[in-house]
Amino acid sequence: ELPYIYVITPTYARSVQKAELTRIANTFSHIKNLHWIVVEDSDERTNLTTHFLFHCGINYTHLHIRSIEHKRRGVEQRNIGLAWLRHNREPNVSRGVVYFADDDNTYSIEIFEEMRYTKKVSIWPVGLTFEARYETPIIGPDNKVKSWHAWHSTERKFATDMAGFAINLNLLLNNPHVWFDNTTRDGFLESSLLSQLVELNDLEPKADNCTKVLVWHTKTITPVFSEDKTWNLEI
Ligand code: UDP
Ligand code: MN
């Protein structure tokens, strides 16, 4: 059977949330054997997300955990997603890959087939990363990652964005003490997680040896509404 793709998505209530969830769900609907782990940054499951998921047509698990104030980066949400996998999937029996997909990014359908057979950690370029047009691993003649074209690329051992890698499920299940670390500086989350799991040499370059951009770190503008909430359709 086709290995499963476990997509862990932190999400939180704001005016654009339903539009963001709709956009990524439309992408995920095309992917076979995808299990979507949606983790809300809230004290309880919200009605909006509950109803949205019920009707989205994708296999999903709906979790929630409220972030510590001032530390709202999706860290606890991704960790709860990992905890769920460690409780609900059996090491060396389940086959699959884990991908951390923020709700505001843009994902091509191709990237999921690139990651599906990840042995340890797959890696690929990410477009529209802050001030850079893209960030990418730099691949040597031996088809291994040599270095990075990325922000703070010399300080970060794994200078990749959250959207730029996927991890074999069993690697995470067999290393049950590996978590995202809420105490790392901004921008070092990915590197700190991957450092606990692999060496540079283990990385599996995807997307035609990292020559194609198949995911984008898009950011949605927060709208400022000029009217009162007299028109009360859910948006
Ligand atoms: N997020 C969250 N709670 C928050 C802020 C963000 O759960 O208070 C989620 C958000 O929905 C997204 C992820 O964490 O899936 C990363 O957030 P964001 O896209 O704002 O971060 P950036 O793109 O700036 O790194
Ligand atoms: Mn984002």
Image (spheres, helix red, strand yellow):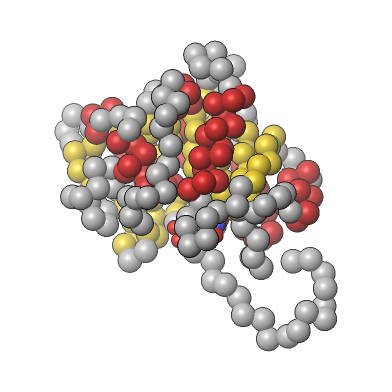
Image vertical order of residue 218 relative to residue 157, above or below: below
Q: Residue 175: x, y in percent? A: 41, 24
Quadrant of image for the N terminus: top right
Q: Residue 229: x, y in percent? A: 78, 79
Residue depicted at x 52% and y 43%:
78
* Nearer to me, 87 or 108: 87
Q: Residue 27: x, y in percent? A: 61, 46
* Nearer to me, 50 or 148: 50
Quadrant of image for the C terminus: bottom right
From the viewer's perspective, tell me whether residue 114 is left or right of residue 212.
Answer: right
* Nearer to me, 217 or 50: 50
Image vertical order of residue 67 relative to residue 199, above or below: below
Q: Residue 43: x, y in percent? A: 67, 52
Whether residue 192 is visible? yes
Residue depicted at x 65% and y 61%:
13
Residue depicted at x 37% and y 63%:
130
